[in-house]
Image (cartoon, rainbow, N blue to C red):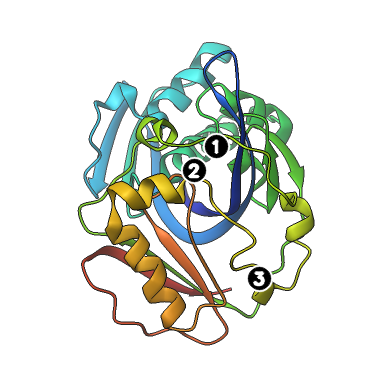
């Protein structure tokens, strides 16, 4: 069985509080976008993970896809599988590629093993793997609050726009590194209200609280955002904790982007 695991972008990201457990409370809108990794599972004598494409810098057992397999294995009597993953979405980019792969693995196993798990149960299991993982169980625009695992459907219509996502060469931001520089604060205007504005009014009002600290240590990211706005984006932002930047354009974009590791354009 084969599946395609799409990534996401964040529209707005407010870090509102630091929790006593060391985590942070946030508010962000997550939107699925059609940039995919590919995962195939084949029944085998023992379970193993084979990664192709982009380099995955972690041992197989620590990969979120393998953690997803183990999470199902601990709960249900399932077969071993050879797992072949073609990595296309860049890591360390704030696109949730690894989280998407993990949740896609849960869904694959649900289908292959005939477990009959509802979406809500898949999301609950996904939450034990990573904060972004439950979102990919629903795979529709969601407002995420708390640590990012409390999800509420939100209406965001980007249809007719062009989306350009790009990751600067040699820049990957870890979640730990991103949170080290943020100063939690309550925004003047709540994100769910700002999202109701016309998209051409988002710039300068819908913000990503990670940007100031990330721009300070990775000026390539800020430069990329400026280049997209100069190229005609009606809205541009860093996604998640970075380092990728996306722009929403009324027409197919063709900016000259320098020092890019990966880039993809989509009609939404």
Quadrant of the rendered image containing residue 65 = top left
Residue receiving disc 1: 132
Residue plotted at (59% across, 78% down): 161
Asked whether the residues under the numbered discs 1 and 2 touch, taking CB atoms below 8 Å apart as contact, a structural biologist would say: yes
Task: Give the side of residue 110 with respect to residue 219, left or right.
Answer: right
Name the secondary structure under disc 1. Answer: loop
> Which mark is in front, 2 or 3?
3
Residue plotted at (48% across, 36% down): 105
- In x, y percent, where is residue 70? 45, 19
Q: Earlier in the sequence, mark 1 or mark 2?
A: 2
Q: Using a 10 Å C-alpha cutoff, classify the residue at mark 3 as few (fewer than 14 neighbours), some (14 to 19) or many (20 or more).
A: few
Residue plotted at (28% across, 52% down): 218
Closer to us: 60 or 96: 96
150, above or below 128, in the image: below
Task: Give the side of residue 229 with respect to residue 147, left or right.
Answer: left
59, above or below 254, in the image: above
Q: Earlier in the sequence, mark 1 or mark 3?
A: 1
Asked whether the residues under the numbered discs 1 and 3 touch, taking CB atoms below 8 Å apart as contact, a structural biologist would say: no
Q: Using a 10 Å C-alpha cutoff, classify the residue at mark 1 as few (fewer than 14 neighbours), some (14 to 19) or many (20 or more).
A: many
Q: Earlier in the sequence, mark 2 or mark 3?
A: 2
Q: Which of the numbered marks, if any, corresponds to residue 158?
A: 3
Name the secondary structure under disc 2. Answer: helix
Residue receiving disc 2: 100
Task: Give the side of residue 156 with respect to residue 213, left or right.
Answer: right
């Amino acid at each position: 069985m084969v599946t395609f695991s799409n990534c996401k972008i964040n529209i707005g990201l407010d870090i509102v509080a630091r929790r006593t457990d060391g985590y942070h409370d946030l508010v962000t809108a997550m939107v699925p976008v059609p940039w995919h990794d590919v995962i195939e599972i084949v029944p085998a004598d023992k379970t193993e993970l084979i990664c192709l494409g982009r380099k995955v810098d972690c041992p197989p057992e620590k990969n979120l896809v393998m953690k997803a397999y183990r999470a199902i294995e601990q709960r249900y009597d399932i077969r071993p599988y050879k797992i072949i993953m073609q990595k296309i979405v860049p890591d360390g980019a704030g696109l949730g590629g690894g989280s998407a792969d993990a949740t896609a693995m849960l869904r694959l196993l649900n289908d292959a093993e005939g477990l009959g798990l509802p979406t809500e149960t898949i999301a609950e299991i996904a939450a034990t793997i990573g904060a972004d993982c439950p979102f990919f169980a629903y795979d529709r625009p969601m407002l995420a609050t708390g640590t990012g695992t409390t999800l509420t459907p939100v209406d965001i219509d980007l249809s007719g726009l062009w989306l350009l996502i790009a990751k600067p060469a040699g820049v990957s931001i870890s979640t730990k590194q991103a949170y080290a520089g943020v100063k939690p604060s309550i925004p003047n205007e709540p994100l769910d209200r700002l999202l109701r504005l016309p998209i051409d009014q988002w710039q300068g009002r819908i913000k990503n609280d990670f940007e100031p600290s990330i721009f300070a240590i990775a000026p390539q990211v800020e430069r990329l955002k400026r280049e997209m706005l100069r190229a005609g984006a009606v809205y541009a932002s860093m996604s998640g904790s970075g380092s990728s930047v996306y722009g929403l354009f009324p027409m197919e974009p063709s900016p000259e982007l320098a020092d890019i590791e990966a880039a993809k354009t989509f009609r939404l």
